[in-house]
Amino acid sequence: MDHLDQLESQSVYILREAFNRIDKVLLLWSLGKDSNVMVWLARKAFFGHVPFVVGHIDTGRKFPEMYAFRDRYAKEWNLNFLKEDCPPMEETDPTLPRAARSAARKTLGLRNTIAKHGFTGVIAGIRRDEEAVRAKERYFSPRGDAGQWDFRDQPPEFWDHFNTDLPPGTHLRIHPLLHWTEVDIWRYIERERIPVVDLYFARNGKRYRSLGDQDITNPMASNATTIAEIIAELEATRAPERAGRAMDRETEDAFERLRADGYM
Amino acid sequence: MNAQAVREQLRTVIVGHVDHGKSTLVGRLFHDTGSLPEGKLEAIKAMCERRGMPFEWAFLMDSFQSERDQGITIDTAQIWFKTKKRDYVIIDAPGHREFIKNMITGASSADAALLLIDAGHGIQQQSRLHGFLLNLLGIKQVAVLVNKMDLVGFDASRFGEIREQYIRYLDGLGVRPDYFVPLSARDGDNLVNRSTRMGWYSGPTVTEALDSFHPTLRPTDLPLRLPVQDVYKFDDRRIIVGRVESGRFSVGDQLLFSPSNKTARIASIESWHRPGKAVVAQAGQSVGITLDEQLFIERGEIASHVQDAPRETSVFRGRIFWLGQEPLRVGNTYQLKLLTRSSPVTVQKIERVFDADSLTDRPGVEVPRHGVADVILRSHAMLALDEGRTLARSGRFALSDGHNILAGGVVSMEGYPDQRDALTVKSQNLRRVEHRVPEAARSARNGHRGGVLWFTGLSGAGKSTLAMAVEQELFARGYHVYVLDGDNVRHGLNANLGFSPDDRAENIRRIGEVAALFADAGMIAITAFISPYRSDRQRAREAAKGAFHEIYVEADIETCEQRDPKGLYKKARRGEIAEFTGLTAPYEAPDAAELTVDTRDLDVEKSIKRILDYVERHIAIASQVR
């Protein structure tokens, strides 16, 4: 088994645990590279069939290329697809900085979706190497009834024994990609030939490294037009992956506050 | 395949007492290997300036605002860096006693560990406990880093002193660290670059030590252990899925599932989007297989080859670390999680509680939070498991209270027999075992025979009080026990019966039959009815076929009337109850009860004890323990 096989095996194990242990599971599909890998891993885990609701919490502000991608692959991959809209900006916490408020819409949208459909598990494609607060996550992370994350008192998790039995009213976040890095994701996309949105590839000297809402996501300078070139670029760079995501850096604890409140 | 993709990765945890410099080590390591993300150094500087403090490397990993404000690592974090040789995942584990659960969460997934000891303060409580826990977690590759050498003037004799002390301590655990490295993490001495201030040291630097360690992969050359994670039926295939924890298998191999003792051959290995059809699988892979027969297999079973199956037992010893808020106590029941199996277990005994400081142990009645102890756990169901020292992954477990994981532990089967033989009916035709459960197998699994404890006596003699207390106590001791309560039975099974003499006799007859079924199913049924007629009790005795234990709860009518817990005697005296046993209807005392408990002489506690002693002597089977 090589490194990618090991990563895949661990993710498949976690997805199967989620399927076995949790009643109503929503797999969040943000249309980015990571959640595409996650859908792909679910198809591996369940032999071509995705036994979860695959949901897109739509801000309405994504790139047109992302919507086209979504509509095509929801059908092609035979997904049990669910689209839910985010509430307007006015409903978010006005004390948050501007871009963070934009992100907070997604948190609210997710909270509403969970309440509306009664989901008890939410699978999200976050990785430890993306951001320092995410580095402290568990594979199975319990959330309060409003989706809050009590990061000061997380349950122990070892030897692949997860805390999967929760009191009613709470839900679990499941993070099957927690142990992957950005480069791992691209190598796996390359090996498995997983489709991704074209925006990741350079056009006119710029490409998107991370995809979010159009108005708060910026492209980076790059000439990488193939996956191999992207991998080579990532091997060389020391710029953080989410450098183009304004919401992470407006204040020192902006991202921590977002996550404590239930942001993915 | 791209050569980069197969680069090796080593997972390393950094442990040690609080403030001995773990987070600083990580920060400096990243800086010196050129692994810091762009802008991170500036961000940390800004955070420090905002707090009016000198530059603090720990802020690289201490990503929570509360961690930075308090200058303490709360939760474990992971971060990636690379040397020329390979990629590393660095796991930072908190050193504060309060966050042991987070330290274990971080350390449990590591291939190797760096354990820091402050050169000035020397070996502290958590230095010892972390060493102890690394051993329990099965982490064999350890480098001890004696940090803050700059604060002791780079003194070789201070380094030597700490090394000798710590080696002596670890010897008691049978652990020998691979390296001792004198270090100044803050200044980077002997971290990536060799120190110019400790010429007396010729061993490896920290990165050289790391590069000499090996990733620990799941062992392919040990016996096959494939725990069943789930069974899928998405299409016409019935696929059994799980991850191979050790060993390997091929299509066509015969598998034995434990503890159900069913066997079948592997018909195929299933997968999606993989080139070709696999015919072999090995440790580490998450697989799906189909069998040549449609066995009923559930999550939790362990598949192995027939000749080197796991052990089967209902009792085992675990060396545990306890994380629960409340202490672990004898008689408490927890949910055992062993691979994919989940099953209740009861703490039968606490053999010894360790003092991690002195490595001495003492007997105890409870294990406190963060304690380490050897405990005997008894399961109601048969378990399949392995000796932890031989097969780590099927020989370790967690305990949970149903919501939270409270403990982890390693199995030791020293002194316990394999119970597989007791369960298997010796027969040429193995398949018959599925359909025939002999009485001896039920007893072996339960640790006791089935039986009926038939309490008889006047109203107010104490039958219900004793029945409920005995049930509670037997349950705590791991017995399958149930009280057939008069009101409950009359609400359901006997709802059509009134209180005429015929109906009363029928009431007792049905209870006798139901109690006999319980006994036959291997359980202990306790009944607490006046049951005044010898003939009724005799019929119940015959129904239970030798498993009937008549317990006469004796008290004379005067005593009972004085107690009158339900006010029934008063009502009867007023004529409100017709045919009240002892007053207006007869009570036929037993002439040869198995046990008589005279509640006039004995208080409740002594009465209970007498009944429990009887059960231990006559219904329990000789314990395998001790």
Image: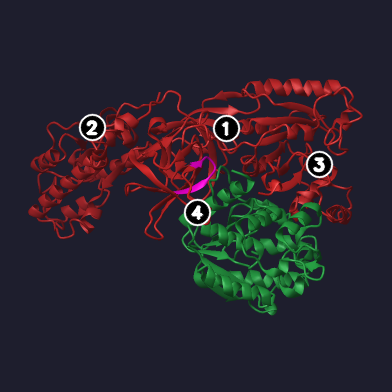
Total number of numbered discs in the rendering: 4
The residue drawn where x is 23% and y is 32% is: B427
**Residue sitting at x 69%, y 52%:** A135
**Which residue is under mark 1?**
B372
The mark that comes first in sequence, 1 or 3, is 3
Depth check, front residue: B222 or A105: B222
Query: Element under label 4?
Result: helix
- Start-end of magenta stretch: B281-288
Q: CA distance from mark 2 to mark 1?
A: 44 Å
- Of badges 1 and 3, the one in the foreground is 3
**Mark 3 nearby-residue class (10 Å; few <14, some 14–19, many ≥20):** many
The quarter of the picture where residue B161 lies is top right
Q: Do marks 2 and 4 share a chain?
A: no
Q: Disc 2 or 1, which lies upstream in sequence?
A: 1
Which amino acid lies under the numbered mark 4 shown in the image of this protein? Arg
Chain the render paints red: B
Question: Is residue B549 rendered to the left or right of residue B389?
Answer: left
Instruction: Judge whether B567 appears above or below B518 on screen.
Output: below
The residue pinned by badge 2 equals B427
Q: Which residue is mark 4?
A: A16
The answer to whether the residue labelled 2 contacts the one labelled 1, judged by CB atoms less than 8 Å apart, is: no
Same chain, labels 2 and 1? yes
Residue visible at 16% across and 46% down? B513
Is label 3 on the same chain as label 2? yes
Determine the secondary structure under disc 2.
loop
The residue tagged 3 is: B29
What's the chain of the residue with tag 3? B
- Chain of the residue on which disc 4 is drawn: A
